[in-house]
Amino acid sequence: MAGRTLGGGFAMNVSPDCEPVPAIRLHDVTVSYDRHPAVHHVSGVFNQGSLTAIVGPNGAGKSTLLKALMREGGQRIEGRIDRGGLSSRDFGYLPQAAAIDRRFPLTVADVVLLGGWHVFGAFGGMTRVLADQARQALAIVGLEGLERRRIETLSSGQFQRVLFARLILQNAKVILLDEPFTAIDARTVHDLLAIVLRWHEEGRTVIAVLHDFEQVRAYFPSTLLLARRVIAWGCTQTALTDARLREAHALAQGWDERAGICEKTPLRSVA
Protein backbone atom coordinates (compact mmCIF):
# COMPACT_ATOMS: atom_id res chain seq x y z
CA MET A 1 0.00 0.00 0.00
CA ALA A 2 1.15 3.52 -0.72
CA GLY A 3 0.77 6.32 1.82
CA ARG A 4 -0.98 9.56 0.84
CA THR A 5 -0.93 12.61 3.12
CA LEU A 6 -4.18 14.55 3.16
CA GLY A 7 -5.09 18.03 4.31
CA GLY A 8 -6.28 16.73 7.69
CA GLY A 9 -2.71 15.86 8.63
CA PHE A 10 -2.88 12.07 8.55
CA ALA A 11 -1.88 9.41 6.05
CA MET A 12 -4.42 7.24 4.32
CA ASN A 13 -3.66 3.99 2.49
CA VAL A 14 -4.70 3.75 -1.13
CA SER A 15 -4.08 0.86 -3.46
CA PRO A 16 -1.89 1.52 -6.52
CA ASP A 17 -4.76 0.64 -8.87
CA CYS A 18 -7.22 2.89 -6.97
CA GLU A 19 -9.34 -0.03 -5.77
CA PRO A 20 -11.35 0.72 -2.59
CA VAL A 21 -9.54 -0.10 0.66
CA PRO A 22 -11.68 -1.37 3.58
CA ALA A 23 -11.63 0.74 6.72
CA ILE A 24 -14.10 -1.41 8.68
CA ARG A 25 -15.28 -4.89 7.70
CA LEU A 26 -18.22 -6.61 9.43
CA HIS A 27 -18.35 -10.40 9.42
CA ASP A 28 -21.76 -11.84 10.39
CA VAL A 29 -22.18 -9.36 13.26
CA THR A 30 -25.04 -9.73 15.73
CA VAL A 31 -25.32 -7.21 18.57
CA SER A 32 -27.42 -8.02 21.63
CA TYR A 33 -28.52 -6.40 24.89
CA ASP A 34 -29.39 -8.83 27.69
CA ARG A 35 -29.23 -11.63 25.11
CA HIS A 36 -31.88 -9.93 22.97
CA PRO A 37 -30.50 -9.18 19.49
CA ALA A 38 -30.84 -5.60 18.27
CA VAL A 39 -28.80 -6.10 15.07
CA HIS A 40 -28.83 -9.41 13.21
CA HIS A 41 -26.10 -11.06 11.11
CA VAL A 42 -24.69 -7.95 9.41
CA SER A 43 -21.87 -8.39 6.91
CA GLY A 44 -20.34 -5.68 4.73
CA VAL A 45 -17.61 -3.09 4.32
CA PHE A 46 -17.16 0.61 5.01
CA ASN A 47 -14.35 1.65 2.67
CA GLN A 48 -11.68 4.21 3.51
CA GLY A 49 -12.78 7.69 2.54
CA SER A 50 -16.42 6.66 2.06
CA LEU A 51 -19.38 8.79 3.13
CA THR A 52 -22.16 6.46 4.29
CA ALA A 53 -25.60 7.09 5.76
CA ILE A 54 -27.22 4.48 8.00
CA VAL A 55 -31.00 4.74 7.74
CA GLY A 56 -34.00 2.67 8.72
CA PRO A 57 -37.13 2.62 10.88
CA ASN A 58 -37.12 3.57 14.56
CA GLY A 59 -35.63 0.75 16.60
CA ALA A 60 -33.82 -0.67 13.58
CA GLY A 61 -30.49 -0.93 15.41
CA LYS A 62 -28.80 2.04 13.75
CA SER A 63 -27.35 3.58 16.92
CA THR A 64 -26.59 0.12 18.29
CA LEU A 65 -24.47 -0.68 15.24
CA LEU A 66 -22.63 2.64 15.53
CA LYS A 67 -21.78 1.93 19.19
CA ALA A 68 -20.61 -1.55 18.24
CA LEU A 69 -18.19 -0.01 15.73
CA MET A 70 -16.85 2.06 18.64
CA ARG A 71 -16.80 -1.02 20.90
CA GLU A 72 -18.80 0.70 23.59
CA GLY A 73 -22.27 0.53 25.07
CA GLY A 74 -22.21 -2.76 27.01
CA GLN A 75 -23.46 -4.87 24.11
CA ARG A 76 -22.69 -8.48 23.41
CA ILE A 77 -21.15 -8.71 19.94
CA GLU A 78 -21.09 -11.97 18.01
CA GLY A 79 -19.27 -12.29 14.73
CA ARG A 80 -16.28 -10.06 14.02
CA ILE A 81 -15.68 -6.36 13.42
CA ASP A 82 -12.34 -5.86 11.67
CA ARG A 83 -11.15 -2.28 12.05
CA GLY A 84 -8.15 -2.77 9.77
CA GLY A 85 -5.48 -1.99 12.34
CA LEU A 86 -7.15 1.27 13.41
CA SER A 87 -6.98 2.05 17.13
CA SER A 88 -9.59 3.73 19.31
CA ARG A 89 -7.71 7.00 18.82
CA ASP A 90 -8.47 6.85 15.11
CA PHE A 91 -12.22 7.03 15.78
CA GLY A 92 -14.25 10.15 16.49
CA TYR A 93 -17.77 9.64 17.81
CA LEU A 94 -20.69 12.05 18.11
CA PRO A 95 -23.50 10.57 20.24
CA GLN A 96 -27.11 11.69 20.07
CA ALA A 97 -27.54 15.09 21.72
CA ALA A 98 -30.21 13.68 24.05
CA ALA A 99 -27.61 11.31 25.53
CA ILE A 100 -25.39 14.17 26.75
CA ASP A 101 -25.97 15.75 30.17
CA ARG A 102 -25.27 19.48 29.87
CA ARG A 103 -25.76 20.21 33.56
CA PHE A 104 -22.07 19.73 34.31
CA PRO A 105 -20.28 23.08 34.89
CA LEU A 106 -18.22 22.91 31.71
CA THR A 107 -17.28 25.71 29.36
CA VAL A 108 -17.26 25.54 25.57
CA ALA A 109 -13.45 25.36 25.66
CA ASP A 110 -13.55 22.46 28.16
CA VAL A 111 -15.70 20.37 25.82
CA VAL A 112 -13.70 21.15 22.69
CA LEU A 113 -10.39 20.38 24.39
CA LEU A 114 -11.64 16.88 25.18
CA GLY A 115 -10.99 16.25 21.50
CA GLY A 116 -7.28 16.60 22.29
CA TRP A 117 -7.33 13.90 24.95
CA HIS A 118 -5.23 11.61 22.77
CA VAL A 119 -2.52 14.30 22.79
CA PHE A 120 -2.28 15.34 26.45
CA GLY A 121 -3.72 12.21 28.13
CA ALA A 122 -4.90 11.82 31.70
CA PHE A 123 -1.88 13.44 33.36
CA GLY A 124 -0.46 15.63 30.61
CA GLY A 125 -0.88 19.37 30.38
CA MET A 126 -2.68 21.31 27.72
CA THR A 127 -0.24 22.97 25.34
CA ARG A 128 -0.54 26.42 23.81
CA VAL A 129 -0.62 24.78 20.39
CA LEU A 130 -3.62 22.67 21.40
CA ALA A 131 -5.41 25.71 22.83
CA ASP A 132 -4.82 27.57 19.57
CA GLN A 133 -6.17 24.61 17.60
CA ALA A 134 -9.28 24.57 19.80
CA ARG A 135 -9.90 28.26 19.05
CA GLN A 136 -9.44 27.58 15.35
CA ALA A 137 -11.94 24.71 15.54
CA LEU A 138 -14.48 27.00 17.19
CA ALA A 139 -13.93 29.58 14.46
CA ILE A 140 -14.60 26.90 11.81
CA VAL A 141 -17.97 26.05 13.39
CA GLY A 142 -18.90 29.71 13.85
CA LEU A 143 -18.43 30.02 17.63
CA GLU A 144 -15.30 32.16 17.77
CA GLY A 145 -15.05 34.06 21.04
CA LEU A 146 -17.43 31.81 23.02
CA GLU A 147 -14.70 29.75 24.71
CA ARG A 148 -15.77 30.74 28.25
CA ARG A 149 -19.50 30.26 27.83
CA ARG A 150 -21.08 27.52 29.96
CA ILE A 151 -22.51 24.78 27.77
CA GLU A 152 -25.78 24.81 29.70
CA THR A 153 -26.47 28.31 28.32
CA LEU A 154 -26.12 27.28 24.66
CA SER A 155 -28.93 26.57 22.22
CA SER A 156 -29.20 23.09 20.73
CA GLY A 157 -27.62 24.30 17.51
CA GLN A 158 -24.74 26.02 19.30
CA PHE A 159 -24.02 22.95 21.39
CA GLN A 160 -23.97 20.74 18.29
CA ARG A 161 -21.43 23.14 16.79
CA VAL A 162 -19.31 22.70 19.94
CA LEU A 163 -19.39 18.91 19.50
CA PHE A 164 -18.31 19.27 15.88
CA ALA A 165 -15.44 21.52 16.99
CA ARG A 166 -14.37 18.75 19.37
CA LEU A 167 -14.32 16.30 16.44
CA ILE A 168 -12.27 18.75 14.37
CA LEU A 169 -9.70 18.96 17.16
CA GLN A 170 -9.62 15.18 17.47
CA ASN A 171 -8.60 14.87 13.81
CA ALA A 172 -9.83 11.28 13.54
CA LYS A 173 -9.56 9.04 10.51
CA VAL A 174 -13.04 7.55 11.03
CA ILE A 175 -15.93 9.76 12.16
CA LEU A 176 -19.19 8.28 13.46
CA LEU A 177 -22.18 10.60 13.78
CA ASP A 178 -25.41 9.57 15.52
CA GLU A 179 -28.27 11.77 14.30
CA PRO A 180 -26.05 14.87 13.94
CA PHE A 181 -28.75 17.11 12.43
CA THR A 182 -31.73 16.32 14.67
CA ALA A 183 -33.54 19.19 16.46
CA ILE A 184 -31.26 21.97 15.24
CA ASP A 185 -31.98 24.98 13.03
CA ALA A 186 -31.62 24.92 9.25
CA ARG A 187 -28.59 27.27 9.19
CA THR A 188 -26.70 25.03 11.62
CA VAL A 189 -27.59 21.96 9.55
CA HIS A 190 -26.22 23.71 6.46
CA ASP A 191 -22.96 24.71 8.19
CA LEU A 192 -22.35 21.32 9.82
CA LEU A 193 -23.18 19.42 6.65
CA ALA A 194 -20.49 21.49 4.91
CA ILE A 195 -17.99 20.26 7.51
CA VAL A 196 -19.06 16.65 6.92
CA LEU A 197 -18.55 17.07 3.18
CA ARG A 198 -15.13 18.61 3.82
CA TRP A 199 -14.14 15.58 5.92
CA HIS A 200 -15.19 13.40 3.00
CA GLU A 201 -13.09 15.47 0.59
CA GLU A 202 -10.10 15.05 2.93
CA GLY A 203 -10.40 11.28 2.65
CA ARG A 204 -11.80 10.53 6.07
CA THR A 205 -14.32 7.72 6.53
CA VAL A 206 -17.62 9.22 7.68
CA ILE A 207 -20.62 7.15 8.84
CA ALA A 208 -23.79 8.94 9.94
CA VAL A 209 -27.15 7.78 11.28
CA LEU A 210 -29.76 9.94 9.53
CA HIS A 211 -33.53 10.21 9.08
CA ASP A 212 -33.91 12.69 6.22
CA PHE A 213 -33.98 10.56 3.06
CA GLU A 214 -33.79 13.57 0.73
CA GLN A 215 -30.69 14.79 2.56
CA VAL A 216 -29.17 11.34 2.24
CA ARG A 217 -29.94 11.18 -1.49
CA ALA A 218 -28.46 14.64 -2.07
CA TYR A 219 -25.20 14.34 -0.13
CA PHE A 220 -24.36 10.75 0.85
CA PRO A 221 -23.05 8.49 -1.95
CA SER A 222 -23.45 5.25 0.06
CA THR A 223 -26.27 4.01 2.26
CA LEU A 224 -26.84 1.12 4.64
CA LEU A 225 -30.60 0.52 4.93
CA LEU A 226 -31.05 -1.35 8.19
CA ALA A 227 -34.08 -2.95 9.83
CA ARG A 228 -32.17 -4.96 12.42
CA ARG A 229 -30.83 -6.85 9.44
CA VAL A 230 -29.46 -5.44 6.21
CA ILE A 231 -32.11 -4.55 3.65
CA ALA A 232 -29.59 -2.99 1.25
CA TRP A 233 -26.05 -1.65 1.42
CA GLY A 234 -24.36 0.20 -1.41
CA CYS A 235 -25.02 3.08 -3.78
CA THR A 236 -27.64 5.38 -2.26
CA GLN A 237 -29.74 5.68 -5.40
CA THR A 238 -30.23 1.92 -5.58
CA ALA A 239 -30.36 1.25 -1.84
CA LEU A 240 -33.12 3.79 -1.13
CA THR A 241 -35.74 2.63 -3.59
CA ASP A 242 -39.40 2.78 -2.63
CA ALA A 243 -39.58 -1.01 -2.68
CA ARG A 244 -36.72 -1.41 -0.23
CA LEU A 245 -38.08 1.30 2.07
CA ARG A 246 -41.43 -0.51 2.10
CA GLU A 247 -39.64 -3.75 2.93
CA ALA A 248 -37.86 -2.10 5.86
CA HIS A 249 -41.11 -0.59 7.12
CA ALA A 250 -42.97 -3.90 6.84
CA LEU A 251 -40.21 -5.70 8.69
CA ALA A 252 -40.34 -3.09 11.49
CA GLN A 253 -44.09 -3.57 11.86
CA GLY A 254 -43.58 -7.30 12.28
CA TRP A 255 -40.94 -7.11 15.03
CA ASP A 256 -41.56 -9.27 18.07
CA GLU A 257 -39.60 -7.96 21.04
CA ARG A 258 -39.85 -11.38 22.71
CA ALA A 259 -38.35 -13.24 19.76
CA GLY A 260 -35.13 -15.15 20.15
CA ILE A 261 -31.99 -15.13 18.02
CA CYS A 262 -32.84 -15.01 14.34
CA GLU A 263 -31.57 -17.36 11.71
CA LYS A 264 -28.74 -16.13 9.53
CA THR A 265 -29.89 -14.38 6.32
CA PRO A 266 -27.63 -13.63 3.35
CA LEU A 267 -26.36 -10.12 2.76
CA ARG A 268 -28.02 -8.21 -0.03
CA SER A 269 -25.50 -5.92 -1.65
CA VAL A 270 -26.21 -3.33 -4.31
CA ALA A 271 -24.00 -1.81 -6.94
Image: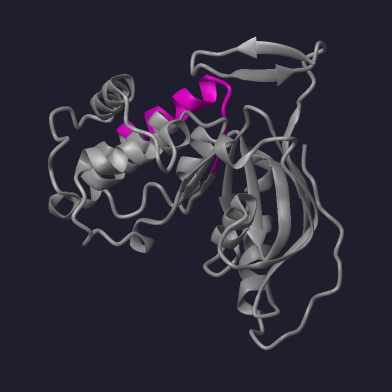
Nearer to me, 97 or 134: 134
Residue 167 position, x and y percent, is 41, 36
Q: Is residue 120 left or right of residue 140?
A: right
Nearer to me, 242 or 103: 103
Q: Give the range drawn in magenta.
A: 191-207
> What residue do we see at 52% from left, 32% from top?
172
Q: In which quarter of the image is the N terminus?
A: top right
Residue 50 position, x and y percent, is 63, 31
**Image: 264 above or below 80:** below
Where, by quadrant of the figure, is residue 5 drawn? Answer: top right
Nearer to me, 211 or 174: 174
> What residue do we see at 25% from left, 29% from top?
138
Q: Is residue 138 left or right of residue 153?
A: right
Does 109 appear in magenta? no
Residue 230 position, x and y percent, is 73, 57
Q: In this view, does 151 lie to the left or right of 238?
A: left
Residue 78 position, x and y percent, is 78, 64
Where, by quadrant of the figure, is residue 125 drawn? Answer: top left
Q: Quadrant of the C terminus?
A: top right
Q: Is the magenta stretch mostly helix, strand or loop?
A: helix
> What residue do we see at 49% from left, 35% from top?
218
**Image: 132 above or below 254:** above
Q: How many labels does the image show?
A: 0
Where, by quadrant of the figure, is residue 90 drawn? Answer: top right
Report whether residue 134 is seen: yes
Report whether residue 206 is seen: no
> What residue do we see at 87% from left, 58% from top?
266
Does 197 appear in magenta? yes
Judged from this view, the residue extending furthest toward the bottom is 258
